[in-house]
Amino acid sequence: MELAIDVQNLNKRFGDKHVVRDLSLRVRTGEIFGFLGPNGSGKTTSIRMLCGLLTPDSGSGRCLGYDVLTQSGEIKRQVGYMTQKFSLWDDLTIAENLEFVARMFGMSGRREAVDRALDDLGLAGRRNQLAGTLSGGWKQRLALAACLLHRPRLLLLDEPTAGVDPKARRDFWEEIHRLSAAGITILVSTHYMDEAERCHRLAYLSYGSLLAAGTADEVIAAQQLATWELSGPGLTGLGAELRRLPGVEQVASFGALLHVSGADVATLQPELERFCHAHGLALERVGSTLEDVFIRLMQHSPDPFQEAS
């Protein structure tokens, strides 16, 4: 398939901090590509380099057919960027905000572009409402409309649904998939595992390094993490004891159940069987989730910028 992004060994430093290390990545045209990782892991910096918003210190590659090192201006004109924090003007109406953004882009046919954006995002009935009076979900919709005014080929979404209710999140993702089907390539950073699973492919970044990439199923399978579900009476308070068992990497509560995960099945399974027999608990092997893998990757990649205590 045609590649929207194809980069090799991108690096970025800020002072003495090596924020992105030798990032190599391919993103297909029309793909929704998700970026996962702990806070400060280099997700936003990586995405900005891929989109021409930040020049790499070294490396090579192309975005939308343009060189990421020497043609960032051409790339930026075809990118829509939606920040985590609402950055439009509270004291302007929805329509006034879009008209102002259209003027900033120097667009011809601004009125038609604004009307189209209002219709496409379901904002036409609120066009005269002040942006400052909108709920989080409607502000999100307005921000996306502003990103799409100039008909970009690539969308950059930086944790776009933070603080938005579940219905607004679902509606937002339906719109994202509609845009993807229309051929727009979308890069999105998120901490929500259900959102990550809606992406076509994922990359997990840890403090500047790419640790895993692929579909959600491929990322889960690559970690070879086994998970068991424990149920029965008296589970409360057993978590600390379980964590001390050989082979246990994670213990997590799920309502009245406990999930225990680890990669060393040969060690962990008999330990869990003995433990459950001794405590009168039921034990069942279940599939590991993307969240289980996310936590495991975090545990195995300590923050190199954290000062030693």
Image (cartoon, helix red, strand yellow):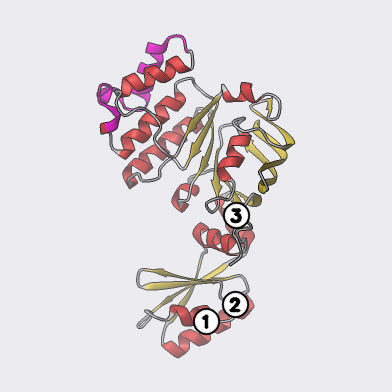
Q: In the rendered structure, which amino acid carries the disc numbered 2?
A: Gly
Disc 1 crowd rating (10 Å Cα; few below 14, some 14-19, many 20+) is: many
Look at mark 1 in the image and give the residue it sits on.
Answer: 272
For marks 2 and 1, the one nearer the N-term is 2
For the point 59% across and 31% down, the residue is 53
Q: In this view, does 264 lie to the left or right of 172?
A: right
- Is residue 211 in view? yes
61 or 221, which lies in front? 61
The residue stretch that appears in magenta = 107-132
Q: Residue furthest top?
A: 108
Disc 3 crowd rating (10 Å Cα; few below 14, some 14-19, many 20+) is: many
Which corner quadrant holds the N terminus? top right
Placement of 233 over or under 61, stated as above or below: below
Give the overall secondary structure of the magenta segment.
helix
Q: Is residue 279 left or right of residue 298?
A: left
Picture coordinates of residue 180 (x, y %)?
A: 50, 33
Q: Do the residues labelled 2 and 1 touch (CB within 8 Å)?
A: no
Look at mark 3 in the image and give the residue it sits on.
Answer: 219
For the point 52% across and 63% down, the residue is 288
Q: In the rendered structure, which amino acid carries the disc numbered 3?
A: Val
Disc 2 from disc 1: Cα separation: 10 Å
